[in-house]
Amino acid sequence: MNSTDSDHPTVTERRRSWSGGHQFLALGPLLVVWVATSALLYASAAQDEVPTDLLFLDPATVGDQPWYTGLLHELGILGWAVAATAAAGGAWVAWLTGRRNSVWFLASGALLTIALLTDEVTGFHSVLGPRLGLAKQVSIGAILAGAALWFVANWHEIRRTRWPILIISLAALAMSVLLDYGRQTTSFHVFYEDAPKLFGIVGWATYFVFTTIDITRSAVRDREHDALAAPA
């Protein structure tokens, strides 16, 4: 047996094809999400404030703009979504393997990322919030406070991860916030503000993806070690 074989011993595949009844019961999660989706669709059809096509169609199509309109903004939304999914998946792995501190660290990171994703999708701090009477500075301050609280509360776990990626990403996002307040000084302000934000978003996603990979790899190695150490 070579070193590769010893590092990754063969495990007998224990999964089997599901019976028809089991497959039917497995449709439960689909039913739940379809019920929630049906409620959303009903609400969109029942209201008469916003034209339905504005809720379904791509903004570029509605505005008769080129297909690439908002492409980098959509990439940022995708980055937040990847980060939230990775963090939630890592929290699940940590929970299955009894790593309680990592569960809180990653689950709270997923919730924070979902808040950032929601702000990115709705433009809450710059558009929706002010329309509701909430100053832009208050919204941004709440986001920054939440991020700082998450960072401080989870520093013990963060320092066991690839934390330089996180620090650099946070610095890029902070730079975007600072440039947001001084953007009127240049006609090229959108690039100078949103370029650092995009760097920060993809860096944030990279951090959580690799953190989840590292935790999963560690859990698998622990399982393999326990299996090899168990008496025959």
Image: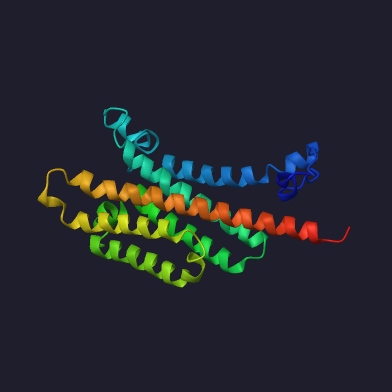
Q: Position of residue 47 (x, y in %)?
A: 39, 44
**Quarter of image, res 78:** top left
Q: Residue at x 12, y 47 (%)?
A: 186
Tell which of 196 and 163 is nearer to you.
163
Residue positioned most to the right? 232
**Quadrant containing the N terminus in the rendered view:** top right
Residue positioned most to the left? 185
**Quarter of image, res 75:** top left
Q: Residue at x 35, y 52 (%)?
A: 200
**Is residue 136 rendered to the left or right of residue 104?**
left
Q: Position of residue 164 (x, y in %)?
A: 41, 59
Count the numbered circles shown: 0
User: What is the image's colouring?
Assistant: rainbow
Q: Position of residue 68 (x, y in %)?
A: 31, 31
**Is residue 13 rendered to the left or right of residue 109?**
right
Q: Is residue 27 above or below residue 112?
A: above
Q: Position of residue 76 (x, y in %)?
A: 37, 45
Q: Residue at x 57, y 59 (%)?
A: 91
